[in-house]
Amino acid sequence: MLHEALDHVSVWSKERVIRRALYLFLAGLIILCTFPATLPAQAKQAAKPNPSTIIDSDQKYAQLPDKIRLKILLKMIRSGRHEFAARLIAAYPFSGRRARNRTLFVEGMILKARGDLDGAIGKFRSVLADDPNLSLVRMELAHTLFLAERDDSAKHHLELLRASAPTTNAAKQFDRFIDAIDARDPWTFDAYVSLAPSTNFNNGTSKQTIILNGLPFQISANSQEKSGIGVRGGANGSYTLRAGKTVDLIASAGINFTEYDGNTFDDLVFSQSLSVQKRIDVGTVVASIITNQRWSGIDEFSWAIGPKIALRKQIAPKIELYSNLRHAIIDYRIADYRSGHITSVEHRLSYGVADGSIAYLIGGAQRSESERNFNDYWGASAGLGLYHEAPYGITVYAEAELHQSWHDGVYPIINEARKDTRIDVDLSLTKRDFEIFGVTPQFQYSYIRNFSNSPLDRYESHGANLTLTKQF
């Protein structure tokens, strides 16, 4: 019986040993299969720690450089942890010379995440007022303006980004964003009213008498220079129909006026156009029919009609060409000797110097013909322009252009063909971080000096204009 019992224990022990060995073998096989797959992932995770693991340790976060902390905060905001980012930046502020702009940018991103778009726009504008070359801030401002449906201002910043885009593909992205803004609302409308002081609003001569053939000649009062403070204003609107994937039909109309004391020099222009726009690779081609009606002075009326072709094309990174060719037939009701036609071509080549700076090379030509050949002329022009966003939120646009004209026939007063040389200088100043109901004030100054072999056509003029703009 004892032998049988021992045999039973022996059998039971052997079975238990075999079973345990089998369990150990299966466990080892499982570990062996999973070990190669888990080890690289664990090693990779150990080599590149999660930012949230770093952030959980205040001491480690506080010791990180500002540049790294900025990246961590932006990543947190974009992942929806903006309130935690707000607590971090309050507890551990940035330091150094970039601290102010980095703080404002992060605060703007937090406000944007909270849905306070106006507050975010204000923060981003403050950063760009100090440093206009921060592309990331300008992109966030453009996107926030888009979300707030401030389309004019959003397009303005996208066009600046497109102008300084380092590659053609980058410029295409901004073009698509601009196209999305245009497609969102087919209707556009804007209006303006401004004061317009001028030292010579009628481009008259400063002389009261001139000497012709040795005899004094009295100049009429309306041909003498007149100064005063006028009012300019107008309204323009358009409707865009998406006729195809890359084709638009655009109908527009506008009215613009200028008024000074009395009504002798008042001017009212009503214009209309119908256009077909084709979107091409980083650019557009527009073919239009343009008409306008003009009321000048007391009783003069004229109308004009003709085609126009315009091209905008990026020909290289940061280089864009804008050209237009226009022909117009003009008819005057009273001064019918001025009726005729005019053909003009204009070119503007832009170079994106930086995000907030664009340089322009300007050129053009013109041919005008009327009922009297001494009024017919050939014209040419050339000039330079610069758009620059300076510190302290000041935007400067300066342009200088030289115009030359050569008339065909003998001018009656001087008994020779008339020749004119005109200098145009324009300057505008905008305070882009000063906002009032979505617009900002803009001061414009203009200077014109015309040199001519005809004494009646020599004049000089200084003018100014104070208005509001959405493009800032």
Image (cartoon, rainbow, N blue to C red):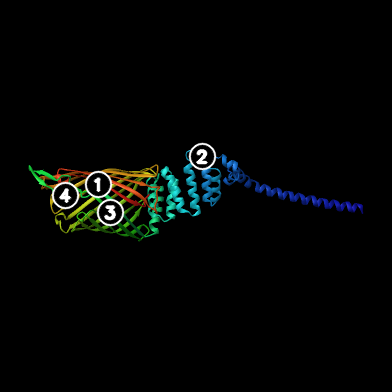
Mark 3, residue position = 232
Q: Residue at x 10, y 46 (%)?
A: 217
Q: 296 and 160: which one is in front? A: 296
Mark 4, residue position = 223
Disc 4 crowd rating (10 Å Cα; few below 14, some 14-19, many 20+) is: some
Cα distance between the residues tagged 3 and 1: 27 Å
Element marked by disc 4: helix
Question: Circles 3 and 2: CB distance less than 8 Å?
Answer: no
| Front position among marks 1 and 4 | 4
| Front position among marks 3 and 1 | 3
Question: Circles 1 and 4: CB distance less than 8 Å?
Answer: no
Is 288 drawn above or below residue 394 in the view shown? Answer: below
Image coords of residue 434 (percent x, y): 39, 48
Disc 1 crowd rating (10 Å Cα; few below 14, some 14-19, many 20+) is: some
Of mark 1 and mark 4, the one earlier in the sequence is: 4
* Farthest-out residue, top: 96
Amino acid type of the residue that numbered disc 3 sits on in the rendered structure? Arg
Of mark 4 and mark 2, the one earlier in the sequence is: 2
Amino acid type of the residue that numbered disc 2 sits on in the rendered structure? Ser
Disc 3 crowd rating (10 Å Cα; few below 14, some 14-19, many 20+) is: many
Of mark 3 and mark 2, the one earlier in the sequence is: 2
- In the picture, the disc for residue 364 is 1
Q: 389 and 16: which one is in front? A: 389
